[in-house]
């Protein structure tokens, strides 16, 4: 791609998307995305929310359940336990795998067997889930445990002689299919903290400034000047993200995987448009006049039938009927004369 050499230095430095990270740890990342359109920034937010793949429990086979909770209740709780999804690319989607139902290339097996034998209430935690050995690596599918006691999520409680025995199948998926595959707890998204673009219509009783406190990002942008006229051509260009992970994927990886998924979507769109524009040199179907770079043998600038005859003719020979005469033997004349 060629650029105009007359561009000034300041424009060259600000050209293209720019990301500035303001805070980051294992579960949170705050960053600013600038020099992009609102639609692109919102697309990134939506992809991070719903299309970054993770692994979660999808099938539960309960062998014994004498607890007070119904089978469906326990299965739902198991599905919401976050599982380690690092190196998730090594795991296939079950719909893309060659196996009959499930195998080590597309799923991870977890089992649980707990029975209360004392008079005290027994708590069953995610740390008691036993992960099978048939999986792509030693990390994927492990329950995420972040509490100080290293117990994990609470599954259920058992009284004396109550028992829970089950087997789980965890599969790869995205949050657009079910929320249990979501890599994030929440994503904060904000722009124009001073509402200079008037995209928000704030309800207030007496004074909007005092009743609507400014966000922390109002400190990094200039407030509108007193009596400044409204700019109808202004568009947002700085967007503030706050990504909160749940531990199955590191927060910075969520952003990188979201960008990769957005790139894949755009690449698929460009590839699809390229096929229809003859960029791959394979498409040779019917087109409107002047839309083809080549000259297909069965088309006459779009004005003929697919069989090579002129537009006013039928597929079997032109203005005559299929048999050359009328049903009464006189070619093209009145059958009654």
Image (cartoon, rainbow, N blue to C red):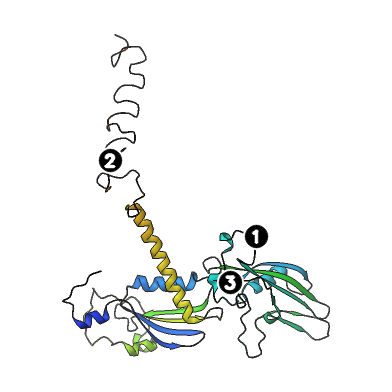
What residue does disc 2 label? 302
Camera-nearest residue between 53 and 97:
97
Instruction: Tell me the residue at 63%/79% (across/down).
Output: 143
Q: Residue at x 58, y 71 (%)?
A: 55
Question: Which numbered circle lies on residue 81?
Answer: none
SS under mark 3: strand
Q: CA distance from mark 3 to mark 1?
A: 17 Å
Q: Which residue is mark 1?
A: 101
Front residue of 74/34: it is 34
The one nearer the camera, 54 or 121, is 54
* 3D distance between C-alphas at marks 2 and 1: 50 Å
User: Mark 2 packing: few (<14 Cα in 10 Å), some, or many (20+)?
Assistant: some
Identify whether 284 is placed above or below 54: above
Circles 3, 2 touching at the beta carbon (< 8 Å):
no
The answer to whether residue 207 shows anywhere in this view is no
Rendered residue at 48%/73% (across/down):
49
- Looking at the image, tell me whether mark 2 or mark 1 is earlier in sequence order: 1
Label placed on residue 55: 3
Residues marked 3 and 1 touching at CB (< 8 Å): no
């Amino acid at each position: 791609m060629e650029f105009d050499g007359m561009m000034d230095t300041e424009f060259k430095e600000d050209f293209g998307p720019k990301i500035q990270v303001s805070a980051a740890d294992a579960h949170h990342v705050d960053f600013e995305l600038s020099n992009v359109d609102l639609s692109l920034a919102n697309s990134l937010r939506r992809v991070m929310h719903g299309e970054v793949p993770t692994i979660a429990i999808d099938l539960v086979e309960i062998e014994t359940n004498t607890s007070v909770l119904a089978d469906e209740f326990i299965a739902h709780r198991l599905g919401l336990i976050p599982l380690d999804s690092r190196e998730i690319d090594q795991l296939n989607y079950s719909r893309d795998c060659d196996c009959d139902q499930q195998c080590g290339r597309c799923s991870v097996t977890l089992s649980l067997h707990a029975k209360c034998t004392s008079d005290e209430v027994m708590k069953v935690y995610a740390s008691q889930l036993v992960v099978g050995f048939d999986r792509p690596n030693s990390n994927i599918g492990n329950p995420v445990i972040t509490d100080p006691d290293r117990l994990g999520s609470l599954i259920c409680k058992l009284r004396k002689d109550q028992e829970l025995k089950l087997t789980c199948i965890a599969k790869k998926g995205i949050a657009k299919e079910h929320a249990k595959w979501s890599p994030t707890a929440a994503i904060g998204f904000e722009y124009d903290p001073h509402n200079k673009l008037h995209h928000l219509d704030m309800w207030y009783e007496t004074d909007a400034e005092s009743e609507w406190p400014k966000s922390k990002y109002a400190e990094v942008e200039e407030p509108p000047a007193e009596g400044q006229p409204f700019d109808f051509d202004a568009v947002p260009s700085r967007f503030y993200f706050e990504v909160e992970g749940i531990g199955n994927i590191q927060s910075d990886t969520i952003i990188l995987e979201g960008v990769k998924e957005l790139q894949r979507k755009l690449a698929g769109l460009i590839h699809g448009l390229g096929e229809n524009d003859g960029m791959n040199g394979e498409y040779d179907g019917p087109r409107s006049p002047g839309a083809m770079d080549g000259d297909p043998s069965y088309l006459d600038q779009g004005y003929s039938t697919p069989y090579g005859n002129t537009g006013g003719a039928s597929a079997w020979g032109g203005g005559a009927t299929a048999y050359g005469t009328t049903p009464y033997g006189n070619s093209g004349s009145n059958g009654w004369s």
